[in-house]
Image: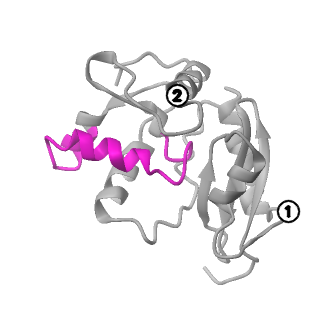
Amino acid sequence: MPRDIAPGYALFDTDVGRCGIAWNGEGTVTAVRLPEESDERMRSFVAKDGVAETTPPQRIQTVIDAVVALTAGADLADDLTWVALDMNGLTDFQRAVYEVARRIPPGQTRTYGDIANEIGLPGSARAVGRALGDNPFPPVVPCHRVTAAGGRTGGFSASGGVNTKMRLLSIEQAVLGLW
């Protein structure tokens, strides 16, 4: 895709709080961030490489609108797999984990072990958890839909921790452990 827009970032409001998104010159998402305790902290995550805060181009506004709808529970049929993500700089392992996580539909969950098995690395559930903890794209890469074995929640690295995870799962009307 040719460079046709200026890279940038924007903050936007959702039912779960103020989120952030950044994009490159191809209109590919480089970061999405769930709410932080302040706009300044949010900017520290999404304002990389000297990009400016700006009005998002239409293709990014479409992503924002979808995230707003999903976090409001308004469009649980949209799994956001259509969103183009810039995964440059990620390891092959992270990419594999994120690709599997992206296929988990809203309202459903999988375990860290399930993902480890699916990527062909049984026994790497903890590494899967670490990769999801470093996820630069929540909720587009829905790490909140990945839980610990036995229906336990597992951790969550976004601001608010497990409470934020449970709030997102509640919005999606998820039942832990179903797949």
The percent position of residue 114, horizontal first and vertical second, equals 25, 35
The C terminus sits in image quarter: top left
Which mark is nearer the camera, 1 or 2? 2
Q: Which residues are magenta?
A: 115-142
Label 2 Cα neighbours within 10 Å, binned few <14 / some 14-19 / many ≥20: many
Left or right, 29 with respect to 98, comes to: right
Q: Residue at x 52, y 49 (%)?
A: 81
Where 67 falls versus 77 (above or below)? below
Q: Amino acid at mark 2?
A: Lys
The percent position of residue 3, horizontal first and vertical second, equals 68, 83
Q: Residue at x 28, y 41 (%)?
A: 115
Label 1 Cα neighbours within 10 Å, binned few <14 / some 14-19 / many ≥20: few
Q: Residue at x 71, y 28 (%)?
A: 72
Q: Quadrant of residue 52?
A: bottom right
Numbered badge on residue 165: 2
Q: Secondary structure at mark 2?
A: helix
Earlier sequence position, callout 1 versus callout 2: 1
